[in-house]
């Protein structure tokens, strides 16, 4: 116990097992550490990734509010935008607004990317995205320039007519599968003129298998097993060293002659 400035400072006792325990914690800590800051969530309203020039769109950056957080960083094609609100309203979009959008805050990671594709057409088949997972709900919309009245609407899949209605309507598939992959388009009458939209190619993929709860639990078994073994070794070594320091116990029993008398000769 060395003296420092007149004060006695106790020094920690380091054993081999303690070092091993510290090493195990250092190596296994990443396995149970969180994945870092939560990710901001970027959404688009209306939800269509493809719009016509002149449409209005609103991008919203969902975040996990924390005290002192009052600004948001927006990125368009990787370049910062001069706005810091949680919503970004774009009136009458033009071709320059096409591209990838992302956002983040001081306490969140960079958000998912949202693609905005802008077209110059009379008619457009709109979709929320180009890739769907098996079992998802897919909604398609036949959209006219400046939302002009649209009649005699027909949807097509791989050039085959799917559904027709005199009035404008959305085409909805509640649970998509691989047969729904392919090219889609729509047609309709604006005023007295018949228009056909450009083709949109949609792909349906298998969902990514999620890690089950039991699998997640098994990920922690090696950590707790190592911790248990090191704790047992550390405890055993502690008592062993303690016994060596204190030395063998003194035998306090009386000598045999002090309590047992030999028989006398007759």
Image: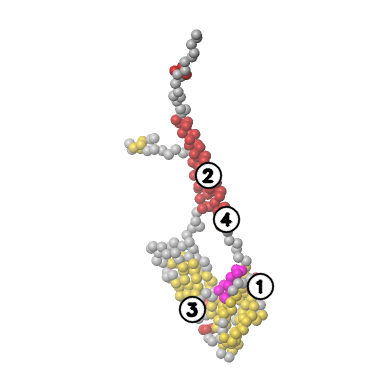
Marks 3/2: CA–CA distance? 61 Å
Which numbered mark, 2 or 1, is in the foreground of this view?
2
Which numbered mark, 1 or 3, is in the foreground of this view?
1
Query: Callout 3: helix, strand or loop?
Result: loop
Q: Which residues are magenta?
A: 127-139
Query: Callout 2: helix, strand or loop?
Result: helix
Residue 145, how many percent across, how many down? 54, 83
Name of the residue lying farthest toward the front:
266
Q: Residue, x 55% and y 81% (percent of image)?
A: 143
Q: Residue, x 47% and y 32% (percent of image)?
A: 243
Count of numbered marks: 4
Tell which circle, 1 or 3, labels the residue nearer the N-terminal end.
Answer: 3
Type of colouring: secondary structure
Does residue 148 appear in this view?
Answer: yes
Q: Which residue is mark 1?
A: 179
**Image quadrant where one finds the N terminus:** top left
Marks 3/4: CA–CA distance? 47 Å
The image quarter containing residue 50 is bottom right
The disc label shown at residue 247, or none:
none
Q: Which residue is mark 4?
A: 214
Which numbered mark, 3 or 2, is in the foreground of this view?
2
């Amino acid at each position: 116990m060395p003296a420092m400035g007149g004060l006695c400072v106790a020094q920690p006792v380091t054993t081999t097992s303690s070092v091993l325990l510290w090493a195990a914690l250092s190596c296994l800590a990443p396995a149970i550490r969180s994945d870092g800051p939560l990710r901001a969530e970027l959404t688009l309203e209306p939800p269509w990734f493809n719009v016509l020039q002149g449409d209005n769109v609103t991008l919203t950056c969902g975040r996990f509010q924390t005290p002192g957080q009052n600004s948001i960083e927006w990125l368009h094609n990787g370049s910062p935008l001069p706005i810091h609100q949680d919503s970004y309203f774009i009136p009458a979009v033009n071709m320059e607004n096409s591209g990838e959008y992302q956002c983040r805050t001081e306490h969140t990671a960079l958000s998912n990317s949202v693609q905005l594709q802008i077209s110059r057409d009379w008619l457009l088949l709109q979709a929320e995205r180009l890739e769907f997972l098996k079992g998802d709900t897919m909604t398609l919309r036949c959209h006219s320039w400046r939302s002009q009245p649209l009649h005699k609407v027909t949807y097509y899949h791989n050039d085959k007519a799917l559904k027709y209605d005199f009035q404008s309507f959305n085409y909805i598939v509640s649970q998509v599968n691989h047969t729904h992959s392919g090219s889609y388009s729509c047609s309709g009458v604006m005023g007295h003129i018949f228009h056909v939209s450009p083709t949109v190619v949609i792909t349906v993929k298998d969902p990514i298998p999620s890690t089950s709860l039991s699998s997640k639990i098994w990920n922690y078994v090696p950590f707790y097993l190592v911790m248990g073994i090191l704790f047992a070794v550390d405890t055993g070594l502690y008592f062993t060293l303690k016994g060596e320091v204190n030395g063998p116990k003194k035998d306090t029993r009386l000598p045999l002659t002090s309590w047992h008398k030999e028989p006398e000769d007759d």
